[in-house]
Image (cartoon, rainbow, N blue to C red):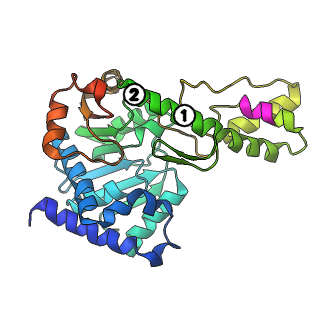
Amino acid sequence: MTPIEQTTHQLYTLFSQALASQNKERYHEELWRSYGHVATPSGARRRVQFVYDLCRLARFDPQDKVILDAGCGYGVIAIILSLMGTRKVWGIDISEERLTTFQRMIQDYHLAERLDAQRRSVEDTGLENSSVDAVISNEAISHYYDVDAFLREAARVLKPGGVLLIADGNNAANPLRRRDTEEIWNRFENGPPGEVHGHRLETPYVEMRRQIIRSAAPDLPAEIVDRLALETAYMQREQVVHAVNEYLTTGKFPNSRFDRRRCPVNPELGAYMERMFYPAQFAREIEQYGFRARHYAALGGAIPTWLSVPGRLFTALTPLTLPSARAFRIVAVRE
């Protein structure tokens, strides 16, 4: 059995147990929607191949290494890395629901020797200086509230020669991808709830802000609440409450309205909804924090569907393939 086959078998076995019907009260329901395919042999293989290919691209061997998974979600990437023989994977995320599920899976399947999951911001990981061999951000960088602060933190915690590996499906160099993403932005800000380009919306952000405003000032007339909700786009809860208090004190509206060409912010989580990046420009920005960085075009997106050989060929043809690539990769080495 090859290492990939062994890791695939272990992952498939684990998720076959985790996604059994008796666990639906213990784990968050989104685990089934987003990762149900991992409980199949082909789905588990696809996920494992994805991680192996990322490591190959970065020329990084996770064996006996310490890794930070920044924005780990339910921990699938972190689990795969641990099965590949890491010494430790630190998973951090700001989503309480996802972190709780990941923490319960660590407990239920006795994974604590190589895995740890904490609810922390990627801007403040709590790790020591020069303590990790790699920082991985998979389908997470587009949600960070402060990317610059994350890059500073990644540079701080990485050992010299350590690797920052970013994989994301929001390639702004692809005009079709940008069009679809702008439609996602508009729906998540303004509604209505439902499915949009593979994303499920429960409550529009403008409605979240209405609820925050009503809680902060229950006596405000409905038309004032509506206007404040419209003019507090891109604000987090504390900022919305501050804007309400400013209005009550001075009568001044905040005048921060949604722009269809700009990614909206979840006011409760303080996370962006699928921010776009121009990979070449982003790689240059990363280098300002003490890295040598290269960008690559990539097939696939949040759920990798590409096979290794065509995926490598597509990547090798960067920058020719970048305008048609849905996703991108950045490999940055700490100097």
Residue 285 percent location from the top left of the image: 36, 23
Amino acid at dot 2: Leu
Label 1 secondary element: helix
Residue at x-position 69% and y-position 44% = 208
Question: Which of the two residues, 200 or 251, is positioned nearer the viewer here?
Answer: 200
Q: Position of residue 239 (x, y in %)?
A: 69, 35
Provide the major secondary structure of the magenta segment.
Answer: helix
Q: Earlier in the sequence, mark 1 or mark 2?
A: 2
Residue at position x 86%, y 38% in the image: 222
Instruction: Identify which residue, 323 or 141, lies in the foreground.
Output: 323
Amino acid marked by disc 1: Trp
Q: CA distance from mark 1 to mark 2?
A: 14 Å
The residue singled out by tag 1 in the image is 185
Query: Is residue 124 shown left or right of residue 135?
Result: right
Q: Is residue 236 visible?
A: no
Secondary structure under badge 2?
A: helix
**333 left or right, relative to 140:** left
Question: Taking 245 as reference, is 34 left or right?
Answer: left
Q: Nearer the viewer, mark 1 or mark 2?
A: 2
Q: Is residue 228 visible?
A: yes
